[in-house]
């Protein structure tokens, strides 16, 4: 990696097993500094496991992982650089936002209490009301604001907007994008909602069947793929020159999603660019199971 854009996360063959169950298998990936990386995959693909490994909340059973240049660990120096918001939005329901601000000041050396108060007031979220009485969107905003007050270098978000309505999701993501624009922050955002991810993310990690299927800048990954449409016929020649990701057929026509290995020379095929939704669903379709239906496509709400 260039020194001006170092890798915040690097893994090589990273694996995690729980007894006889493989939660993550030989995951190799890189996330450069300053990216908002979309972590996509069906339920059970290993997204939460990966985030826990990166946060130092679980130990790998194989492979290597480096976060911010070192091994994830449960010590104050490492934890001061990491922000982690779990799906259940871990807050003390009987405490107010102001109470949480006070607790954070005792636990974090670079605590920015003023930023929390400013953000929450701008969102009309009361500081003196117990968080258990706030809406789901308000609680998510409190959790994000508190996490950002640590001034972390890496923010790990495990489906933080899954239960929010569209307006609350938009506000949460706008707040997140604003924080990254300030510089020095890298984000890994797990979500099933492709429309939200397209709005804010510029990097992609796609997991399926406990393995990394794709990892890279979204623009680069999209440029490496094409959709071919042509008469239904044998695809052997295409598969020799390109990687066939998915094929769908009607009686007369075939539609192929390929990872391009060179120019498409057969004039029978009409090539078109691929969108993020089409790309993600194509790769996930290779490993489709009951959880496949849980991915929400662009324009839909959970």
Image: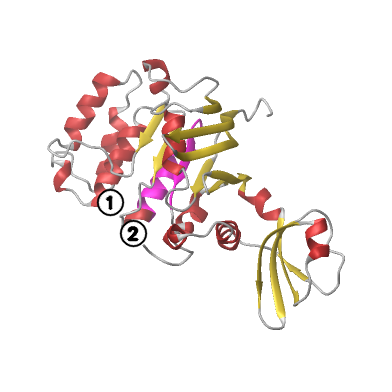
Q: Quadrant of the N terminus?
A: top right
Q: Residue furthest front?
A: 20
Residue that sits furthest to the bottom in the current view:
251
Give how far across and how far down residue 157 sits, in percent.
40, 41
Where is residue 25 shown, x and y percent of the image? 54, 38
Seen in the picture, residue 77 relative to 227 is either above or below; the reply is: above
* Position above or below: 89 against 73: below
Q: Residue at x 48, y 57 (%)?
A: 194
**What span is in magenta?**
170-191
State whether residue 105 appears in this view: yes
Under tag 2, what secondary structure?
Answer: helix
Q: Relative to residue 147, is residue 221 drawn left or right? A: right
Is residue 22 covered in magenta? no
User: What is the secondary structure assignment of the residue under circle 1?
Assistant: helix
- Of the image marks 1 and 2, the number of the one nearer the N terminus: 1
Where residue 137 is drawn, which disc sits there?
Answer: 1
Q: Residue at x 50, y 39 (%)?
A: 24
Q: Report the number of numbered marks.
A: 2
Q: Which residue bears the numbered disc 2?
A: 167
In space, the residues marked 1 and 2 are separated at their CA atoms by: 9 Å
């Amino acid at each position: 990696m260039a020194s001006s854009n170092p890798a915040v996360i690097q893994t090589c063959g990273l694996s995690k097993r729980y007894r006889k169950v493989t939660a993550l298998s030989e995951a190799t990936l890189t996330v450069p500094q300053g990216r908002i990386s979309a972590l996509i995959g069906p339920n059970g693909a290993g997204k939460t496991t990966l985030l826990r490994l990166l946060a130092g909340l679980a130990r790998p059973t194989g492979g290597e992982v480096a976060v911010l240049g070192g091994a994830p660990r449960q010590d104050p120096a490492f934890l001061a650089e990491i922000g982690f918001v779990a799906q259940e939005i871990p807050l003390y329901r009987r405490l107010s936002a102001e109470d949480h601000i006070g607790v954070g000041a005792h636990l974090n050396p670079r605590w920015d209490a003023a930023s929390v108060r400013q953000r929450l007031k701008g969102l009309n979220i009361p500081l003196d009301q117990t968080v258990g009485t706030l809406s789901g969107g308000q609680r998510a905003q409190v959790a994000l604001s508190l996490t950002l007050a640590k001034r972390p270098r890496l923010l790990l978000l495990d489906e933080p907007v899954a239960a929010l309505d569209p307006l609350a999701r938009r506000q949460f993501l706008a707040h997140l994008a604003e924080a990254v624009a300030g510089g020095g922050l890298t984000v890994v955002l797990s979500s099933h909602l492709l429309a939200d991810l397209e709005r804010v993310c510029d990097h992609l990690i796609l997991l399926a069947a406990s393995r990394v299927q794709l990892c890279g800048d979204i623009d680069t990954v999209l440029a490496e793929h094409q959709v071919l449409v042509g008469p239904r016929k044998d695809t052997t020649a295409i598969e020799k020159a390109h990687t066939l990701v998915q094929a769908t057929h009607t009686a007369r026509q075939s539609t192929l999603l390929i990872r391009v290995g060179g120019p498409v020379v057969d004039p029978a095929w009409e090539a078109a660019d691929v969108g993020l939704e089409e790309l993600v669903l194509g790769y996930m379709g290779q490993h489709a199971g009951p959880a496949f239906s849980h991915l929400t496509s662009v324009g839909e709400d959970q």
